[in-house]
Amino acid sequence: MHQDNRYKKQGLARFIQAFVNSGKGFASVWLNESAFRQEVCLLIFLSMIALFLPISINDKFVLILCIFPVLIVELINSAIESTVDRISMEEHDLSGRAKDMASAAVLISLLIVLCVWCFIFWKNFNVFFQ
C-alpha cells in the first residue's frame, strides 16, 4: 500500500523516529536472537584480544572492524526469518531456502573474519604457512 507523503515525517522528526525504530530493532534482536547475542560476545572477546596484541594500531582497527559486518548480516538474517515466519509458520521450500540463504550469508561474514584474523596473524607473527 502506498503511503501518502503528506503524513510522512520529515527533517529532524524523521531522523528521531528512525533512531527510535533502530533502537527497537536492536532491543528486539537482543531479546529474541541468541545468535546475535553470541556474536556481540564474540565482538567483545575478539576486540579485547586485538587491543592487547603487539601489533600496529591499523591492524588492531582492521581486526575489530571486520567483525561488525557479522552483526549487520545477522540483523538482516533475523529480519528475513521474522518476515518469513510472519507470512506463515507452515514449512515451505521457498521459506526454507530464504532462511538458509540468509544463514549462509552469516557464515560467509564469519569466514571473512576468520580470513582477516589469519592474515593479520600471518603478517605479524609469521604463523600459518611457514
Image: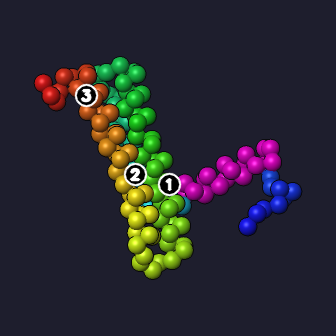
Residue at left offset 87%, top offset 57%: 6
Q: Determine the CA span between mark 2 and mark 3.
A: 25 Å
Task: Give the residue type at disc 1.
Answer: Ile
Q: Is residue 22 located in the magenta-colored stretch of the structure?
A: yes
Task: Decide which of 125, 48 is in the foreground and name it.
Answer: 125
Please state the extent of the stretch shown in magenta in the rendering.
10-27
* Image x and y of residue 85, in percent: 49, 72
Residue 10 at x, y percent in the picture: 81, 48
* Residue 34 % position (x, y): 40, 60
Residue at x 78%, y 44% (from the top left corner):
12
Give the Cα distance between marks 1 and 2: 9 Å
Q: Nearer the viewer, residue 110 or 88?
A: 88
Q: Earlier in the sequence, mark 2 or mark 3?
A: 2
Read off the residue under disc 1.
76
**Secondary-structure class at tag 1:** helix
Judged from the image, the secondary structure of the residue bearing numbered disc 3 is helix
Residue with the mark numbered 3: 121
